[in-house]
Amino acid sequence: MNALSRLFPRRWAALALTLLIGAGLAVALPGCTTNPVTGRSQLMLVSENQAIDASRTAYVEMLAPAREEGRVDADPEMTARVQRITERVVAQAVKYRPETADWEWEIRVIEAPDTVNAFAMAGGKMAIYSGIIEQLELTDDELAQIIGHEIAHALSAHTAEKMSVALASNLAVAGYAMTGDRSPVALTGAALGAALAVQLPHSRRMEAEADRIGIELAARAGYDPDAAASLWRKMAEQANGRHPVFLSTHPAPESRQRDLTRMADEFRPLYEQARGSSVPTHPVN
Ligand SMILES: [Zn+2]
């Protein structure tokens, strides 16, 4: 992610994405499909399964530099905490979309104290940076909100949608050729497209979807919905002076605080109910 950010300024990312997806995929006839969770109509030139395949490859390569430096899951306690929360929230995600029980859900904690970020790719491949946990001093409830939000992006096929939008909006200007020395050599075609999609901002609409689905999943998993508003407040405060990567890819809808507070009231009964019972888990690698 960081290496990719240096290699690809964002203004080039969408264009590069176009070229690389185009090169790597046999693009199907343009079409819209219905969001599997919200029912919203989405532009899907790249199918969810294509995005999942591309993301699987990209995820391994994106984590490779950190893995070589021993920065993946380096802190056993933090890793276990993230894993435990994720398994509870994923169990709720699978109830939303039963076919996602077959996904290879995975989350890795990347040791990077200065990086306030987390991301999800198609098929439930996720990563969270130690900086977001430590700098924001996240409680379990707040951590569950981030994980729920990322899981919601995955559930809603937002990677495939971002790849599709980039493809559609830049097809006409596909004259720019990537030079060899700017390309991360290990990734090509659709896999590089999926890696670049992680860097592109979600739309406000995607953010609103992920906020709503995420807070509900977390509530059903037994995590306090009030933590959603406190998480984003901390994020905004931390942003003073510096701009967390997380906020550039997850732009805040203007009404986010107000909406989250309202949703917390709406989902509190689910949280109370979950707290009074044993919460299921779903295996996560
Ligand atoms: Zn988001």
Image (spheres, helix red, strand yellow):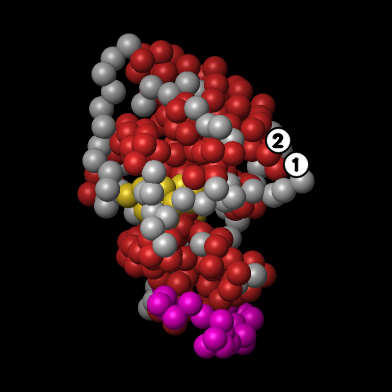
Disc 2 from disc 1: Cα separation: 6 Å
Identify the residue position indicated by label 1 in the image: 240
- What residue type is disc 2 on? Glu
Q: Position of residue 21 (x, y in %)?
A: 46, 75
Magenta stretch bounds: 170-190
Identify the residue position indicated by label 2 in the image: 237
Pointers 2 and 1 in contact (C-beta within 8 Å): yes
Which circle marks residue 281 in the picture?
none
Q: Position of residue 138 (x, y in %)?
A: 53, 31
Vertical side of 223 occupied by 109: above or below? below
Vertical side of 36 occupied by 145: above or below? above
Q: Secondary structure at mark 1?
A: loop
Judge from the rendering whether residue 165 lies leftward or rightward of residue 28; answer left or right: right
How crowded pointer 1 is (Cα within 10 Å; few <14, some 14-19, many 20+) is rated as few
Residue 234 is drawn in which quadrant?
top right
Judge from the rendering whether residue 114 lies leftward or rightward of residue 99; answer left or right: right
Residue 199 is drawn in which quadrant?
bottom right
Question: Does the beta carbon of the residue at mark 1 sit less than 8 Å from ligand 1?
Answer: no
